[in-house]
Image: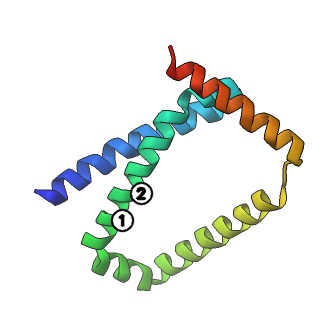
Amino acid sequence: MFRKIVAVTMFVSFIAMSTSGLLMFVIDRTSFTLQMHPVHKVFGLLMVVTALAHITFNFRSLKAHVKARAGTIAGGVLVAALVGLYAVAMSNSVPTDTAAALDALSHKAEQQMEGQ
């Protein structure tokens, strides 16, 4: 029963994350990103929790996939891409005054949207 709940929750979370992420990618406006932020944030957290449960339930199968040559190569390429993208993102720092102004504006916008 719990496995079924995890699977359905993970599926719905994936739909929410992928659609909100794609919409934010296509509609590249900060105001729209702020609108989608609550959906993306809540379902992202839910997806992480259910993914951890899913990995726990299927650990032996995952281990077997990783041991296969194709799984090892795919996993290695994806991990390298992830580390590379994190390195690029972390090295692109936003100036402190700009970051503070953006943070203040986004906080104000979120409060106004909650008050509607």
| Crowding at mark 1 (Cα within 10 Å: few <14, some 14-19, many 20+) | few
Q: For the residues marked 1 and 2, what is the alpha-carbon distance in whole angstroms?
A: 6 Å
Residue visible at 51% across and 17% down in the picture = 115
Identify residue type, mark 1: Leu
Q: Do labels 1 and 2 touch, CB within 8 Å?
A: yes
User: Which residue is tagged 2?
Assistant: 48
Whole-percent x and y of residue 50?
33, 57
Q: Taking the image as drawn, is residue 19 in sight?
A: no
Please indicate, yes or no, whether residue 51 appears anywhere in the rendered image. Answer: yes
Q: In the figure, 17 relative to 48: above or below?
A: above
Which quarter of the image is occupied by the N terminus?
Answer: bottom left
Q: Provide the secondary structure element on which disc 1 rests.
A: helix
Pointer 1: what residue? 52
| Kind of residue sitting beneath label 2 | Val
Image quarter of residue 61: bottom left
Tell me if 72 is positioned left or right of 82 in this view: left
Q: Report which quarter residue 32 is drawn in.
A: top right
Relative placement, left or right, of 99 versus 37 is right
